[in-house]
Image: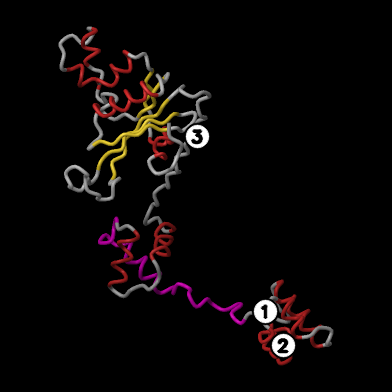
């Protein structure tokens, strides 16, 4: 607007400092400290102020097109091509690659995506919200529940077996962790299997005692994931024998011991067992 000078708050503050510096109410060093710049910068600002007045303190790019602005002619070319049948159905990333190959545009893929969205040439996918898993409180007492898990990994870092001298390689760590105290029982095996879970559970029962319940994932060791297929192998699925056949050996063992089994629907549900595979926690 003619006759008016638009200034930001920072520029107005600089103007006030330059006025005080001109009246020698402040030194250059004090002005530099107040403005948060170096004394050398103050000398440059003051020199422009003496030469051009308040306009010398304003940003030189104000009111001018930005150096990184998207050129209107490139936007027009891109939109004209993308509206043609040849480019129908092109996603922003692929469309950007083709237009850049032909040296038709220089702006980025995000700008093209916004243009295509604004002109109804592309419908962005809805971003899925991250699943929030509410923290489950620990059991109140030791032995109320234990979590079981297996973790395959090169736990021995390629070290040789003392007996055979052959590198151990990847093996599975079976663990039982008490939900209330995070105390552990551990056992190694070549792979995750029912027999080694039984061995570890036997150690737990004889050395610690019987827990009230177990908390596991839905691995086929702990439960049959396809109950209907298991029953389909029998002629009379309503018989008690057929129901027992639909259970895993681990389920039948826990039922015999009167230990309740709880199956987790996600790894996060049994986070204490998952985290124990990479953390140091107290052991039994």
How far from the left and from the top, in percent, is residue 247? 26, 18
Quarter of the C terminus within the rendering = top left
Q: Which label is found at residue 130?
A: none
The quarter of the displayed image where residue 35 is located = bottom right
What residue is shown with label 1? 37
* Disc number lying in front (1 or 2): 1
| Mark 3, other Cα within 10 Å: few <14 / some 14–19 / many ≥20 | few
The quarter of the displayed image where residue 81 is located = bottom left
* Residue 111 shown in magenta: no
Q: Horizontal placement of 185 versus 53: left or right? A: left
How far from the left and from the top, in percent, is residue 14? 73, 79
**Disc on the earlier residue, 3 or 2:** 2
Q: Which label is found at residue 46?
A: 2
Span highlighted in magenta in the image: 60-89
Asked if residue 81 is positioned above or below residue 274 in the image, the reply reads below
How far from the left and from the top, in percent, is residue 223? 28, 24
Asked if residue 75 is positioned above or below residue 134 in the image, the reply reads below
What residue is shown with label 3? 134
The one of 260 and 56 positioned closer to us in this rendering: 260
Quarter of the N terminus within the rendering = bottom right
């Amino acid at each position: 607007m003619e006759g008016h000078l638009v200034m930001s708050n920072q520029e107005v503050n600089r103007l006030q400092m330059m006025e005080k510096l001109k009246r020698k109410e402040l030194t250059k060093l004090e002005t530099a400290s107040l403005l948060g710049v170096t004394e050398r910068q103050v000398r440059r600002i003051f020199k422009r102020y003496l030469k051009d007045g308040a306009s010398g303190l304003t940003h030189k790019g104000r009111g001018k097109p930005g150096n990184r602005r998207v050129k209107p002619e490139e936007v027009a070319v891109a939109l004209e091509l993308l509206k043609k049948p040849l480019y129908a159905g092109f996603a922003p990333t692929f469309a950007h690659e083709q237009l850049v190959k032909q040296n038709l545009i220089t702006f980025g893929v995000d700008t093209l995506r916004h243009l295509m969205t604004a002109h109804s040439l592309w419908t962005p996918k809805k971003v899925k919200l991250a699943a929030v898993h509410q923290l489950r409180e620990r059991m109140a007492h030791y032995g109320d529940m234990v979590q079981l898990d297996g973790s395959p990994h090169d736990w021995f870092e390629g070290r040789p077996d003392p007996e055979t001298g052959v590198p151990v390689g990847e093996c599975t760590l079976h663990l039982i962790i008490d939900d209330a105290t995070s105390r552990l029982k551990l056992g190694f095996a070549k792979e995750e299997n029912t027999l080694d879970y039984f061995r570890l559970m036997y150690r737990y029962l004889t050395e610690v005692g019987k827990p009230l319940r177990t908390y596991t994932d839905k691995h086929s060791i702990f439960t049959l994931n396809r109950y209907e297929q298991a029953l389909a192998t029998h002629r009379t699925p309503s018989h008690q024998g057929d129901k027992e056949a639909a259970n895993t050996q681990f389920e039948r063992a826990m039922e015999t011991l009167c230990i309740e089994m709880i199956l987790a629907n996600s790894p996060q549900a049994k986070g204490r067992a998952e985290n124990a595979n990479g953390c140091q926690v107290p052991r039994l």
